[in-house]
Amino acid sequence: MVGRIGRRVVLGGLAATSVRAAETTVTLGLLHTLSPAPFYMARERGYFAAEGINLVFRFFDAAQPIAAAAVSGDIDVGVTALTGGFFNLADKGLLKVIGGGLHEEKGFEGSAIIVSNQAFDAGLTSPDRLGGHSVAITQFGSSIHYMVGRIAEAKGFDVKTVSLRVVQQVANMLAAVSSGQADATIVIGSQAKQLAAAGQAHIIGWVGDIVPYQITALFTTEQTIQRNEPALRGFAKAFRRGVGDYRTAFLQPGASPAAIDSAVADITKYVFTGDPAARAKILAGIGYYDDGGALDVADVKDQLRWFRAQGLVKGDTDPDAFFDTRFLPVR
């Protein structure tokens, strides 16, 4: 099966020596967006290859199918938002969270709340006014659904007054807002700023300023861990190096232009490819990663609490059973 971690023999050293080295193929499920940028950088810089890993990207259009693909064996590791679908699978013991990804953080423009021009002109100019409006989401139980719920808690309006419009894909969410078919949605900063600059929507707030949380995380199956712990350790090591370079280029004061340009060049091989405005779009959409790809365990438990409270996760498994923290640090 495509996603099963497999080994293939490659020639190593001088040909005359017939020395052979094993390379492990790891398939990573992810969204085709800017948010997994440390993986793009680590792959381009040879960090995975240095650990004997052939990293294969499999791109998806929404978060929940990535969790299902991990369970079916179509991918080995996933990195995306933790959805209701994910938690239901994890509740059955089928998935484990092994590391952190993008973290919504105050002061960082990660995920933007955007509204249509019509809704903005009618008074939807701040997040506390979302009650009574329509919001485009990919699916019930998605990260967008979760963020709307947590914003409602923080701003004091009843989430039940929000009309959730399920449109399946992120591209459809953007189209729904730009065409006025939905009043609002939540998307990553680079997409939001692009729409706003084109005069097709308005940004009215940033999720990290309202509800900081672990928006994406790394996960895999217990079977994959048991079969391939050494490969996962190498995978995690390469990812940490990618996060370190990402933080150096984008999150630390005084980054050198050379470091920024190098990071942008690596990222544009995967997103904004061939776009003359790629550098500006990347810098406009940079999100926050904790040092070392650390996981915010307490926040993931808060997410599980919310999904259970909404009836979107039915089980009552001990939340501690959802994690395997031997690979990456904990926040």
Image (spheres, rainbow, N blue to C red):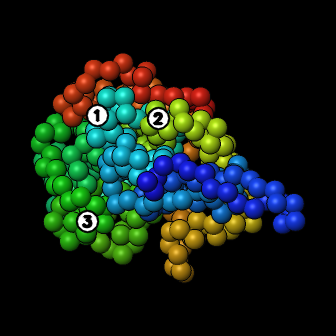
- Which residue sits at x=50%, y=59%? 57
First in sequence, mark 1 or 3: give its number. 1
Where's the N terminus, which quadrant?
Answer: bottom left
- Residue beneath disc 2: 223
Nearer to me, 102 or 56: 56
Is residue 140 toward the left or the right of residue 150 in the image? left
250 to 317, vertically: above or below: below
Q: Up-down: is 46 above or below 310? A: below
The disc labelled 1 sits on which kind of residue?
Answer: Asn
Q: Report the disc number at residue 88.
A: 1
Task: Kindly identify the residue that appears in the image at 69 percent across and 52 percent down.
Answer: 22
**What amino acid does circle 3 point to?**
Asn
Amino acid type at circle 2 is Gln
Residue situated in front as seen by the camera: 303 or 181 = 303
Question: Residue 41 or 229: which is nearer the viewer?
Answer: 229
> Which residue is the site of mark 3?
172
Residue 101 is situated, as x and y percent measured from the top left of the image, at: 51, 44
Position of 226 relative to 236 (above/below): above
In the picture, residue 254 is in which quadrant? Answer: bottom right
